[in-house]
Amino acid sequence: MNKKKISLVPALRFPDFVNSGDWADMRLGDLICPVEERAGTKKYTLMSVNTGQGLITQIEKFGREIAGSAYKNYYVIKKGDFAYNKSATKQYPEGYISMLTEYEEGALPNSIFTCFRVIDKNTYSKIFDHLFHANYHGSWLRQYIKIGGRANGALSIDNRHLWAMPITLPEFEEQQKIADCLSSMDELITAEGKKLLALKQYKKGLMQKLFPAEGKTIPQLRFPEFVNSGDWGTSSLGEVCGITGGAGFPIKYQGLKNLAIPFIKVSDMNLTKNLKYITVANNYIDQETAKILNAKILPVNTVVIAKVGAAIFLERKRIVLVPCCIDNNMMGLIPKPFLNPQYFYQYLTTVLFSELAQGNTLPAINNTIVSEIPFPLPCLKEQEKIADCLSELDKRINAQTKKINALKLHKKALMQQLFPSFKEMGAEINSVN
């Protein structure tokens, strides 16, 4: 291992390494070798990357294998090898580097991946997996991406910049201790994620029984007090709610926060931690502007959805908890007084508006299409019972989501303590570039 000693240690060290001295600064290229073996005619599991999740099979990601005639040139990697996906995402604008952990071997497209293997015997490979997941490489590579730009939708980065990336590490045993600690956190996060998935699947299955199947007038499962209450009524969305569109947003109000009325755009649908509700927006207007724009002020309990563009396919539905206006890429569904608002929302979560979208270049749904969607209508008390049951599950799902997010924040904070800051790591080598 080529080392250049610098005075650099993390804020937090395990007790048995407190007196182990400074960490060493080196280059990634000194610790690895590129992997460029080609698949040829031999059969391998075809891999792709889910950003933040890691290497998965093409079948998992795309539902099928997509290699075609390019397969023979795919890179072959083995368990413990790394693959750098040179495609920008919102979370990883400099691309994502993932370690193969679940399969013994796999094959990846050579057109967008750079693959490498740790060969230095004093380096514990797993520690890189945690660093790359935290986007350590991004803090180094972004300076070169600005220069290189993009080619055919992929980031144009010369591999020599990746190999030149500075890495600051302790001795092998301390690397192992750090990586194993962080891996334990990952295992806990994964376990809690499985609990969250189970809750969501349970709710989905329960909803299929609490609402009538297509062509039926009563659900498979009813609460005891309603078993002998007769058939449900059948209505349409146009009969049980008001349907309204939005207005164009005035640029002069961009970013204003001190006005009274939230002006909700599609991008605001994920602003709140509880993804069932909307309480805030990035932009606000006043009453006078709403009148000028002919923008309807929607009441509390309106359910808003996207009605234009790719956002339709995300199937996001949100309840607004404050009077608001929406932009012209959205639609507001205002439940009538004889509906329980939570029941209204819960049923809408089962409706796939994306299946009603028209147009290939710019998919859209309109008021007429939406108004004709069938809507099952039990009595108000049964609506309330169903809504209370499903809302309680929503609370548990939200609490579990918060727990997972808290664990992720804890891991992030722990990494900040267990490693020198990304800015400090390699600073001395960088200073002589």
Image: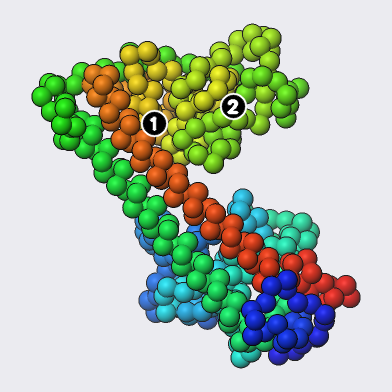
Q: Which residue is mark 2?
A: 264
In primary-sequence order, the first of circles 1 and 2 is 2
Q: Residue furthest front?
A: 15
Foreground pick, 183 / 364: 183
Q: How are the colours assigned in the image?
A: rainbow
Asked if residue 238 can be seen in this view, the reply is no
Whether the residues at callouts 1 and 2 have beta carbons within 8 Å, the answer is no
Foreground pick, 363 / 242: 242
Residue drawn at (12%, 21%) of the image: 230
Crowd around label 2: few <14 · some 14–19 · many ≥20 (10 Å)? many
User: Looking at the picture, which amino acid does disc 2 mark?
Assistant: Ile
Residue drawn at (37%, 13%) of the image: 337
Residue drawn at (33%, 53%) of the image: 198
Q: Quadrant of the C terminus?
A: bottom right
Q: Residue furthest right?
A: 432
Crowd around label 1: few <14 · some 14–19 · many ≥20 (10 Å)? many
Q: Quadrant of the N terminus?
A: bottom right
Asked if residue 175 can be seen in this view, the reply is yes
Nearer the observer, disc 1 or disc 2?
2
Residue drawn at (68%, 68%) of the image: 417
Image-based side of 344 in relation to 23, left or right: left
Image-based side of 234 in relation to 98, left or right: left
Image-based side of 385 in relation to 104, left or right: left
User: Looking at the picture, which amino acid does disc 1 mark?
Assistant: Phe
Label 2: element kind: strand
How far is the residue under mark 1 from the one under mark 2? 19 Å
Please provide percent x and percent y for residue 217. Answer: 16, 25
Q: Quadrant of residue 235?
A: top left
Where 252 sits versus 2, above or below?
Answer: above
Please provide percent x and percent y for residue 324. Answer: 57, 20
Q: Which residue is mark 1?
A: 353
